[in-house]
Each structure stands twice: as C-alpha cells, then as structure tokens.
Image (spheres, helix red, strand yellow):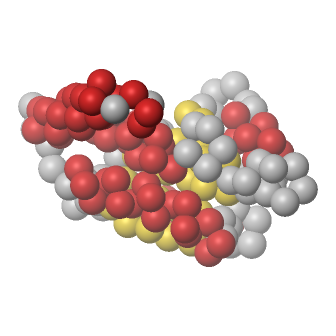
Amino acid sequence: MTTSYAVSVGIVMGSRSDMPVMERAAALLEEFGVPHEVRVLSAHRTPDAVEAWVSTAVENGTRVFIAAAGGAAHLAGVIAAHTQVPVIGVPMATQALGGLDSLLSTVQMPRGIPVATVAIGAAENAALLAVAILAISDEALAERLADYRERQTQAVLDDPANA
C-alpha cells in the first residue's frame, strides 16, 4: 500500500538556536523525498501556537512529529498530549548539564502519553525513525530506506575506519 501526504513529518524546535542540529533531520528527509515542514515554537512561550499548529498539521497530513528542545524539554510531550500521531523527541545539548536534563525531560513521559526519544542531538536518527514509521505503509519509501541501510553497511565494510 502506498500513501502520499502533503506534509508527512512536522519538525519543530523550541528555539532557533536548535536549527543547526535539526537541519540535519530536514536534510535526511529531503534525501528520502519525504515532505516535511519546519517550525520554531516553544512549549512554554507559545503553548497556544503549538496546540494550533499540531491540530492544523495533522489535518494537513502530518503523520509523524519530530520535536527538539533543551533544558526542561517539554515540547515533545506537549505535542504528544495534543495528538495520537507518533512523536519523536530530540533532546538538545545544554550548557548547564550537557543535555542530560533534556534527555530525562523527554524520555520520562507519563504513562499514556508516549514519546519516542533518540539520543541527545540525534536529529538524523529521529529522521530515520520517522522514515521507518512512514515506510510501514509506503512500499517505495521502504525500498529507499533499505537501500540507504545497505549503502551504510557497505561503507563500513569498504572502510572500517568509517564505522
């Protein structure tokens, strides 16, 4: 079964300073041909805008959210509270605790409101997880993901120093 959406992945970050990291997720989604949009919204400073965007994004076909935030890092949880669409949290590095605060805030969601969480700053893994979720119902995307992983494997076999 192949499905096409206007915007399949919504990428949101709590601060413009997160953009250099999250651009890597957007670039990987581009490589896979996955439609996406990028927003800067704060769980704490713009909570009404977050809620409105999530609702509109889902209506427009968003099937996965990637949310990056540092410090208290509530953005992924706030998004998950407003939708049943999968949410992937990307904890961001912080000056105070190196991102451990962000990691714990993102991964410790209360029972009933899950957020998948990747490593601190692991925007690429968040994008790959989003692609894998979408590939469940998109055969062409599943093939592109398999090809990507095969190229990754081959690169390590060709030059173990790249592992």
Residue 78 visible, this angle: no
Q: Quadrant of the C terminus?
A: top left
Left or right of 95: which side holds 118? left
Q: Position of residue 94 (x, y in %)?
A: 79, 57
Q: Quadrant of the N terminus?
A: top left
Residue sitting nearer the eye, 138 or 25: 25
Residue 9 visible, this angle: yes
Q: Position of residue 42 (x, y in %)?
A: 67, 67
Q: How many marks?
A: 0
Residue under the image location 56 percent in, 53 percent down:
67
Report which quarter residue 46 is drawn in. bottom right
Report which quarter residue 112 is drawn in. top right
Residue under the image location 73 percent in, 41 percent down:
103
Report which quarter residue 159 is drawn in. top left
Left or right of 143: which side holds 47? right
Residue under the image location 58 percent in, 37 percent down:
118
Above or below for 6 versus 109? below
Residue under the image location 29 percent in, 34 percent down:
155
Q: Residue furthest right?
A: 96
Left or right of 127: which side holds 50? right
Residue sitting nearer the eye, 97 or 72: 97
